[in-house]
Every structure is written in C-alpha cells, then in structure tokens.
C-alpha cells in the first residue's frame, strides 16, 4: 500500500531522514513527517519566529494531529524523533531538583535574617525611640532581594489537562510541547474556555488567569506546540460530538492533520542499527536546544523572513486563495482551513530553513 507524500521539495537530508526512520520503524511517511515537524517546532519555538510578507510576525509553534489505527507506530515514531528532547528534559529535571534544594536553604536563611531585623525594629518601637529607622534600609534590601524560586526547563508534557499545562507554562522558562496519545478522550472533556486558552497559547498570546480560591498566574512570552494522536473512530466521534465547537473556535483549522492509510500487513522488517541521518538529526536538535539555553531571557527571538522571490509567490498564492473562498469559490466550504494554510506553511518553511 502507498501513502504518497511529496518529498521532492525538501532537502536531501530531510528526505533521507524520513527514509531512515521508515527503515527503523516501518510506518507511513505522513506519520514520520508529522513527528519530524513536531520535534523541530518544540526545539525552535523559543529561538525563532517568522515575519510574513504582510508584516505579521508569528511563532513557529505547530499543532499536529495524527489519525491512524492502533499498531501504526504513531507513538513509537514520535518517541524516536523526540529522543533528544526527552534526554534534555531528564537533565533539566535533575538540575531543577538541585536548584530547589539550594533555594530551600537560601529562603530559610533569608527568613531568619528578616525575622532578626523585624525583632530589632520591634524592640526600638517598644522603647519609644527612632533607632528602628537605621534598620529600615536593611529590611527593605532584604525584602527586595528575596531568593527567587527556580523555573523548570522541562518541555514535554504528556496526557495532562489544559489547566495543569497552563500552570506548568507559567512556572517554566521554556515553551512546552503538549503530547497526548489518547487525544480522543482528552478533547471530548475540554470546555470552551480550555479550547480558547489552547488556541491563545498556540498563537503566542499572553494569558492572565485570575483565581479567587487558588493562586493566580500569568503566561507571558511562552510558546506551545501540540502533538495529538488518535484512532479514526475516536476522531469521528469527536467530530460528531464537538465538531462545530472545534471548527468554529478555529482549533482544528489551525492543526496540521494527517490521516494515512494503514500499512499493517505490508511492512518490511525493521533495521536495528541507528542511521547516520537519525544521528545527525539528533545532533542538530541538541545544538538548537543548547542555542536556546544560551539565549538570554530578554533577548528577542531570531526573525526569519521571506526572500523577495518567495514573498512574491506568497502574495500571489494569498490572492488566489482569497478568491477561492468567495461565495462562489471552489474552496468556500473549507474556508477555515484555507485561511490558515499560508500561516502553517510559513511556520514550517522557517523551521526547515533554520
């Protein structure tokens, strides 16, 4: 069976990477390309952004959905391609645990110092003199230099809830990758508010969450990519239940969805050795993660732009697509996807180029 995907426009390295993954984990090429783009997006969303020819600047975060039967190796392919990120997350978690221990010691010492100064001020006030004023500056200095709790640098979160994901993002110094291998059951549980929050995060918006009974928090200058996997029957069930909400909200039109034909019964035996193309891919992902780590928090993202020739083609295609969704246009029924087409293509182009 054939799952055609046009790889001719990609670089030799990209094509060979697809073939190498295909030999190691026999799966359809759309699933493999979806995994590659997920890894690229999660690795670079804190590093680069793309300026469209119309002047709009977008994040390079992607929302990717794979619809395939159980046994089509969706999760295996994704885990293979995300291995450098998972390894980086392990190291980040270990580093975070050490930082938390140091923070606990520092905050305990800080509290003792504050309490001591407070005691001196209280004594002076009780005596009825103004000696406490000499402690004021020291007290203010202590309060303003309270040790800050370290932030996590873990990127990948699997099968979590939207509120938990958002809370994690507010306490992290890096963007997140939201992976759900059971997207069918997960999406069915989302409220309109949660879907709206997810869309805002995918678009790179700042979000402030006000809570009366629990801690309020803000998500600022953070990026989110998503990788959803589900079986066809669950996808059909979601569409029948929440199709209008997911379409009208713009969530599904924002997603790059692949639904390949099943390959079970036609797969070759996998190769055990690691291809040099997969090794080089890992090396590049690790370089990108290190580049992000070295970037200062207040340093602007690298901006990817269009060459004059590419900008001309973009504008030409944009006009064609706009005409196609007119009331009598042949793309009118899929206008929501058409409106997002150039956005997603531009994001992918920036990721592959960088």
Image: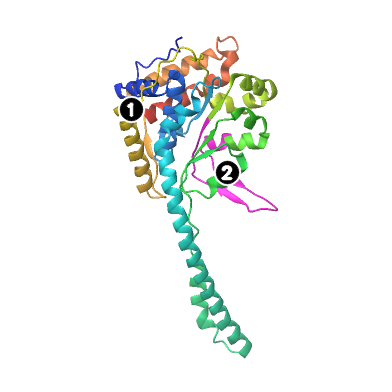
Res 99 label:
none
Mark 2 packing: few (<14 Cα in 10 Å), some, or many (20+)?
many
The correct choice, above or below, for 119 with respect to 37 in the image is below
Q: Is 295 or 70 nearer to us in this picture?
A: 70
Mark 1 packing: few (<14 Cα in 10 Å), some, or many (20+)?
few
Residue at 34% x, 24% y: name it. Answer: 17
The correct choice, above or below, for 333 with respect to 304 in the image is above
Q: Which residues are magenta?
A: 199-227
Q: Which residue in the protein does label 1 denote?
A: 273
Residue at 59% x, 47% y: name it. Answer: 208
Q: Quadrant of residue 307?
A: top left
Secondary structure category for the residue under label 1: loop
> Residue 129: x, y in percent?
59, 89
Secondary structure category for the residue under label 2: helix
Res 166 label:
2
Numbered marks: total: 2
């Amino acid at each position: 069976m054939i799952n055609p995907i046009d790889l001719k426009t990609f670089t030799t390295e990209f094509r060979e990477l697809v073939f190498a993954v295909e030999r190691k984990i026999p799966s359809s090429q759309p699933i493999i390309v979806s995994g590659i783009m997920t890894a690229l997006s999660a690795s670079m969303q804190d590093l680069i952004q793309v300026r469209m020819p119309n002047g709009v600047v977008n994040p390079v975060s992607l929302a990717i959905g794979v619809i395939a039967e159980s046994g089509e190796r969706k999760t295996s392919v994704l885990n293979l391609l995300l291995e450098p990120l998972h390894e980086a997350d392990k190291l980040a978690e270990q580093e975070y645990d050490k930082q938390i221990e140091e923070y606990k010691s520092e905050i305990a010492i800080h509290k003792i110092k504050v309490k001591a100064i407070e005691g001196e001020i209280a004594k002076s006030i009780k005596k009825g003199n103004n000696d406490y004023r000499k402690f004021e500056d020291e007290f203010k200095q202590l309060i303003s230099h309270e040790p800050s709790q370290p932030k996590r640098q873990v990127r990948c979160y699997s099968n979590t809830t939207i509120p938990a994901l958002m809370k994690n993002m507010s306490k992290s110094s890096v963007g997140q990758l939201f992976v759900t291998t059971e997207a069918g059951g997960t999406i069915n549980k989302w409220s309109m508010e949660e879907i709206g929050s997810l869309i805002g995060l995918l678009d790179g918006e700042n979000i402030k969450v006000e809570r009366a009974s629990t801690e309020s928090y803000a998500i600022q200058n953070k990026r989110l990519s998503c990788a959803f996997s589900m079986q066809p029957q669950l996808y059909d069930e979601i569409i029948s239940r929440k199709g209008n909400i997911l379409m009208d909200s713009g969530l599904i039109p924002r997603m790059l969805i692949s639904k390949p034909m099943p390959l079970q019964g036609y797969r070759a035996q996998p190769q055990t050795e690691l291809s040099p193309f997969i090794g080089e891919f890992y090396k590049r992902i690790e370089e990108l993660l290190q580049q992000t780590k070295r970037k200062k928090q207040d340093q602007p993202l690298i901006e990817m732009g269009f060459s004059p020739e590419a900008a001309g083609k973009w504008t030409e295609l944009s006009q064609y697509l706009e005409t196609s969704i007119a009331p009598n246009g042949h793309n009118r029924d899929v206008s929501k996807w058409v409106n997002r087409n150039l956005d997603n293509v531009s994001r992918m182009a920036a990721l592959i180029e960088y």
